[in-house]
Amino acid sequence: MPSAAVLEQKKQIVADLNKQISESCTGILVDYEGINVADDTKLRKELREAGVKYSVVKNNLLKLAIEGTSLEGLSEHLNGTTALATSNEDYVVAAKILNTFASKNEKVFNIKSGYLDGEIISVEKIVSLAKLPSKEILLATVCNVFNAPIASFARAVQAIVDKSGEQPAAEAAE
C-alpha cells in the first residue's frame, strides 16, 4: 500500500495530465521502446522548439486521467512504453515531427494513436495531418486567394489608365 504522500503525488500527476489533455487541441501517443538517448534528446528539443509538450507517462496514470472523458477509448493503446505529445495551438506540428521521426526509426518508435479536439483519431489520420502544410502556409495561401481578385482588378484598372493615358500622348504628337 503506497504512503499517503505517494498517493497524493500520483493524484496530482493525474490532475496535471487531465489538465494538459483538456487544454490541448491535439495529442499523440507514441511507443518509444528502443530509442537511444541521443535521438530522444534531439526529438525532445525539436518538439519543445515547436511548442509541443512531450513527456513519458505511466499507462495507469494516463488511464486515470482520461477516465470518464471522450478520450477513454485511448486506454486500449496504453500498453508498453508510452509517451504523450500535446499541442495547445498548432494542430499539425506534433504530427509532422513525430511522423517524420517514426518513419526514420520504424523499429524503435511508433505512433499508437491520438486525439484532435477531444476526438480519438487513427494513425492514418495522424499521418494525413502530418502531410498538411503548416498553419502559416495555410494562412498565406488563404490570403493569396483573397488578394488575387483584388490584384486582378487593380491591374485591369491600371491597364485602362495606361491605355487612356496613351491616347492623349498620341494626339499631342499629331
Image (spheres, rainbow, N blue to C red):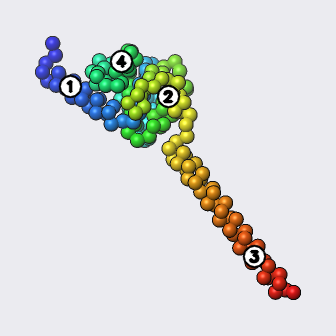
Residue 146 visible at all: yes
Q: Is residue 55 left or right of residue 153?
A: left
Helix, strand or loop status at disc 4: helix
Instruction: State the CA–CA distance, disc 1 to disc 4.
Output: 18 Å
Name the amino acid type tagged 3. Ser
In the rendered image, the vertical position of residue 15 relative to residue 171, given as above or below:
above
Q: Are marks 1 and 4 in contact (CB under 8 Å)?
A: no
Would residue 14 appear left or right of 161 to someone viewing this image? left
The residue singled out by tag 4 in the image is 75
Residue at label 2? 126
Extreme residue toward the left, this view: 4
How many discs mark residues in the rendered view?
4
For discs 3 and 2, the disc positioned in front in the rendered view: 3
Residue 24 in the image: above or below residue 61: below
| Residue 97 to residue 103: above or below | below
3D distance between C-alphas at marks 2 and 4: 18 Å
Point out the tag, 1 or 3, that comes first from the N-terminus: 1
Residue underneath mark 1: 11
4 or 164, nearer to the observer:
164
